[in-house]
Image (cartoon, rainbow, N blue to C red):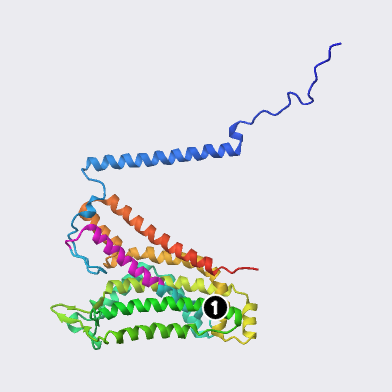
Amino acid sequence: MQSEPSITPDAGLQPSAAPFWRDPAKRAIVFQVAALLLVASVCYYLFTNTQANLERQSIATGFGFLETEAGFEIGEAMVDYSAADSYADALLVGALNTIKVSFIGVILTVILGTFIGIARLSSNWLVARLAAGYIEVMQNIPVLLQLFFWYAIFYETFPSPRQALNPFNGVFLCNRGLIFAVPEAHAAHTAMGWVLLIALVAGWGLNRWGRRRQALTGQIFPIIRVTLALCLGLPLLTWLFYGAPTAMNVPELQSFNFKGGITISPEFSALLLGLVFYTAAFVAEIVRAGIQSVSRGQIEAAMSVGLRPGQVLHLVIFPQALRVIIPPLTSQLLNLTKNSSLAIAIGYADFVAVTNTTINQTGQAIEGVALIMLVYLSFSLSTSLFMNIYNKKMVLVER
């Protein structure tokens, strides 16, 4: 007897494979490949079109121009520079000028913004209203107008070098800037700088040790007083060890300007004041919001155990408020660095101003703009990296 072939119950009813346009994973891959091809096509078109235009106008490309002589002076430089130096040296001077104003501006902005933010929450009606007025005024005046205002103040208010104000011996104030005497170059000053750096590192180490000691024993270590004593005492002892040199490089009026000493130019001062006052208004609101994010119960608990208002702010409020303050603060510090490019409007020789001069002389516009983008990208990423590292250290660890 021949057996009948077995029949699988759902034979022929198995669902067929769905087409790729109905598969989300395959569809996503197709879209990504299409987007990549589109971007590559646009980049290829822009590149070939730019190359053709440059060849038609007989403009050479590349960064070889950086090694040629710049041929222009820069009024403010942190390193030795002359018109006989190369374009690379000129761009380095511009980058250092940008770093200088940005670094000093960031420090002053954080200090001023924190002070205004705390004053905004003061129980004193007048102090709180003055802080609120400052914030409202500075936030609503464009930073470029503030730069013009401070620049005009320096040039319209102060006299010429021949009629310069002399409030102190060796200090002069005129429309060329603030000029003051400095100690003459001596080996003692270099040694004092290194000793000061060592004192700061020692203070940082003592601070870490003091915090661990306080957590274990409850005893408070006077870290601020000890660090100040180290920072003042060790350089003083070094100065005495080298014979206590007192020779000064005093500025003198020669022809139409001062020679010698140190000059803080009106362009640098106007740029610094404009950036600091403008950005500090936004930082103040960030600090205010961070402080108000701390529960009122935390403050009352700290006061109930006898902590003074300064201790409550330093030990209880700020450690908790920083997790709210740091992310938006990072954005404002980045804005300050990028807004420094407005220095060209008041004649300060920052990186953008020096690069624009280089572009006008060499015609290397694409290379110049690419350098500007690269330098400011580096500044922004460096600031973000530092603030992210600091943010991770300030994160509250929950048990």
Q: Which residue, as the protein is rendered here, is positioned at the far top? A: 1
The image shows residue 378 at horizontal and vertical percentages of 38, 59
Give the extent of the magenta segment: 83-106
Residue 110, horizontal then vertical, whole percent: 44, 73
201 and 266: which one is in front?
A: 201
Predominant SS along the magenta part = helix
**In the depicted structure, whether residue 34 falls above or below residue 62:** above
Label total for image: 1
Q: Is residue 8 left or right of residue 287?
A: right
Residue 264 appears left or right of 378: left
Taking the view exactly as shown, the residue that stands out farthest to the left is 255
Tell me where residue 257 sits by quadrant. Answer: bottom left
* The N terminus lies in quadrant: top right
Q: Is residue 102 magenta?
A: yes
Foreground residue among 132 and 69 = 69
Residue 40, compared with residue 178, is above or below; it is above
- Where residue 84 appears, x then y in whole percent? 16, 61
**Compared with residue 15, is residue 137 higher up or lower down, i.e. above or below?**
below
User: Would residue 153 be seen by someone viewing this image from the given angle?
Assistant: yes
Q: Report which residue position mark 1 lands on.
A: 211
Between 69 and 135, the one lying in front of the other is: 69
Q: Residues within 10 Å of mark 1 (few under 14, many from 20)?
A: some
Q: Magenta span has 210?
A: no
* Left or right of residue 184: residue 134: right
Image-quadrant location for residue 268: bottom left
Report whether 148 appears left or right of 33: left
Helix, strand or loop under label 1: helix
The residue under the point 32% across, 80% down is 192
Q: Amino acid at mark 1?
A: Arg
- Seen as rendered, the residue at the extreme front is 241
- Residue 132 appears in the figure: no
